Amino acid sequence: SGAVEIGTGALTGAAQILAEELGIDLADIDVAQVDTEATPFDYGAQGSRTAFSVGNACRVAAADLRRQVFEIAAKQWNVATTDGMELRDKSVVLGNRTMSLAEVASLSQRSGGGLISHGTAIQPMPAYDPTRVKNHPLPAWTSPSFHAHAVEVSVDDATGDVTIERYVVAQDVGFAINPTYIEGQIEGGVAQGIGQALSEEIVYEGGRVLNANLTDYKMPTAMDMPRVETILVEHASVNGPYGAKGVGEPPCIEPPAAIANAIAAASGVRVQAVPITAEKIALARATPCHPERSEGSLKQQQERQGMMPRP
């Protein structure tokens, strides 16, 4: 595949799809990647599209390879049709007949140059009105999904320090090809979002970056991360492989909003810009007219507006 494995497990998912389609073990699949002499073009690891697009291409390639295998078996068995043939346990099966894939591969070498198949996944262009769209839209790389993030925080009254006590994510993944890898991607996305919410900031002065190192640019470490509870919701995509959807980028988006709301509810201070540092919270609390100070907690504001009854 021309796709690049950047740590998301997308090519492991591709291997799983091939193993499922061809009736062989995952250990028997070797996905060659980024070899300009042999691998086809790929648009790149972006837009949460790799598993979605490469997975579909794998299914197309596997279907073509399966057709070739069945045709060789049909010729060897002297049957007129491939109807009823299956790939199971590294063999072609037709009723009580079986032929190993190794034997099929050997026969293919003697009769035409081996078994080679290709698969391409090209999504259809979306419908659009050219009178309203200036630039030609791109095809759908993945399927839209929906997610919910819930976070529980505590805020130190004296210092403004924020501690994330609990973090829960429910994410629509379409179909979980590899649940463990998907949970890892969600946890990684939440880590990025927590960094954006609480600490990460590039500081400029006179056109120069002042914190261009990981000492002064504060990324969260494993010690700063809460345990992330993930709930995988499976609502199948029409176009994805087995109904799968892209999952990598969505969990990066929600944490700043969820954490900001939790801090406002816990402290009565709504900071208007990320990162929401302890200094900003403490300053807003200490300055009654500070623009980032809200009037009471979220619950108190809702009570005043009649949105929820007092106990």
Image: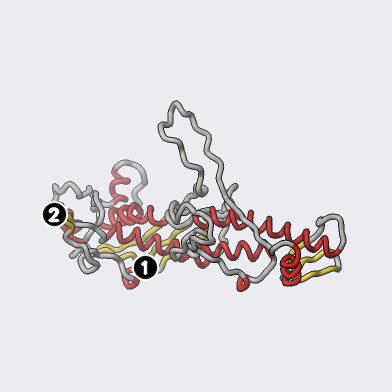
Q: Residue at left 50%, top 58%?
A: 2
Residue 205 visible somewhere in the drawing: yes
Q: Are marks 2 and 1 in contact (CB under 8 Å)?
A: no
Q: Residue 139 vs residue 111: left or right?
A: left
Question: Which coloring applies here?
Answer: secondary structure
Q: Which mark is residue 250?
A: none
User: Which badge, 2 or 1, is on the more N-terminal residue?
Assistant: 2
Q: Position of residue 86 (x, y in %)?
A: 77, 62
Name which quarter of the figure residue 102 lies in.
bottom right
Closest to the camera, between mark 2 and mark 1, is 2
Q: Helix, strand or loop at disc 2? A: strand
- The three-letter amino acid code for the residue at tag 2 is Glu
Give the CA separation, mark 2 to mark 1: 33 Å
The answer to whether residue 10 is above or below residue 257 is: below
Q: Nearer the viewer, residue 39 or 173?
A: 39
Q: Residue 41 vs residue 112: left or right?
A: left
Write down the residue under mark 2: 205
Q: Position of residue 187 (x, y in %)?
A: 42, 64
* Mark 2 neighbour density, 10 Å: few (under 14) some (14–19) many (20 or more): few
Write down the residue under mark 1: 226
Q: Residue at left 42%, top 35%?
A: 135
Q: Nearer the viewer, residue 109 or 127?
A: 109
Q: Residue at left 22%, top 57%?
A: 202
